Amino acid sequence: MSTCPFCVLNEDRILMERGGLRVIADAYPVTNGHLLILPVRHVVSFRELSDSEWREVLALIKLWTERLTAQDPSIAGFNVGINDGEAAGQTILHAHVHLIPRRAGDVPNPRDGVRGVIPGKASY
Ligand SMILES: [Zn+2]
């Protein structure tokens, strides 16, 4: 698995490591502060995470949403999402959760958020 970019991360990219999970900055952030939460061990799908890893994912989402909003008062919300499988847009085949800060006006019409993964189906 040495070709997996999430298995060979540079130490300086790791913001936190705890409970078998890591928090890193997205290499191509869609908004300022876009983070990824991923298991240290290589698994392709989030469906392979253990119960304890899931609890840690949720704890890290809570911790980092609090941290980011404390650092940046312009953050008014978050999208939290998983691209699971190539059909769903997963490009790095090492499970990861996106934590994407949102700010008022960052897109003209934010209505329905992650529903927008299928173009034209978000607003109804
Ligand atoms: Zn990996």
Image (spheres, helix red, strand yellow):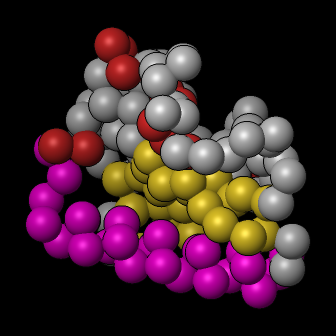
* Residue 78 falls inside the magenta stretch: no
Vertical position of residue 13 compared to residue 121: above or below: below
* Residue 53 falls inside the magenta stretch: yes
Vertical position of residue 43 compared to residue 117: above or below: below
Vertical position of residue 40 compared to residue 117: above or below: below
User: Residue at left 73%, top 70%?
Assistant: 76
Relative to 62, 72 lies left or right: right
- The reply to whether residue 22 is in sight is yes
Vertical position of residue 93 compared to residue 10: above or below: above
What is the quadrant of residue 18 in the picture? bottom left
Q: Position of residue 52 (x, y in %)?
A: 18, 71
For the view shown, which residue lies furthest in the top direction? Answer: 87
What is the quadrant of residue 107 in the picture? top right
Relative to 62, 100 lies left or right: right
| Quarter occupied by the N terminus | top left
Q: Which residues are magenta?
A: 48-72
User: Residue at left 53%, top 45%?
Assistant: 112
User: Residue at left 80%, top 60%?
Assistant: 103
Q: Position of residue 73 (x, y in %)?
A: 85, 79
Q: Nearer the viewer, residue 40 or 65?
A: 65
